Image: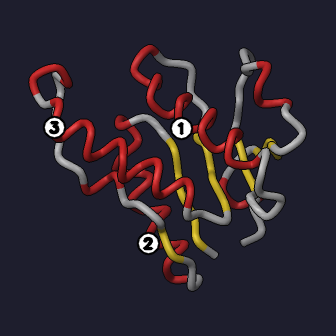
Amino acid sequence: MKIYIAARHALKKEIAEVYELLELRGHFITNKWTEQKSIKPYQEHRKEAQQYIAEDLAGITNADVVIFYSEYSPDARGCYIELGYALSQAESRSDLQIYVIEPGDNPSMFFFHPKITIVKDINEIVI
């Protein structure tokens, strides 16, 4: 399967390990954003930010499965936008599967969208 993982950058190391696990199982990661260099503050790196945005959205568009690591944090804004983009894709694609990992005590209303499956951890996703 082709997989995209959305998570905040603070989880970069953990997500890179998940990529390795999934690839060992024969899956393809549609965009390894963990390999992108840090470009904050974004306003000083607009061109690079635009490139990363295009790569991330293409990764979601080309995925069969989108996995969202939920974490309530001010620096998790980008991954929530990625989740919204995945939901917009799912409206016209019946094959797209979206998983939210551990929404915690303060889940977003959108986690209960009919296209989303909530799981406790990556091991609950049978892929």
Please tell me which residue is depicted at 12% across the width and 30% down the height of the picture.
45
Quarter of the picture containing the N terminus is bottom right
Please tell me which residue is depicted at 77% across the width and 51% down the height of the picture.
92
Label located before the other in sequence (1 or 2): 2
Residue occupied by mark 2: 20
What residue occupies the far right of the structure in this picture? Answer: 114
Q: Position of residue 32 (x, y in %)?
A: 37, 60
Q: Position of residue 125 (x, y in %)?
A: 75, 61
Measured in 3D between alpha carbons, the distance from the residue under mark 1 to the one under mark 2, in whole angstroms, is 21 Å
Residue 68 in sight: yes
Label located before the other in sequence (3 or 1): 3
Residue occupied by mark 3: 47
Q: In the rendered view, does 108 fall on the left or right side of 41?
A: right
Residue occupied by mark 1: 82
The amino acid type, in three-letter code, at marker 2 is Glu
Nearer the observer, 48 or 20: 48
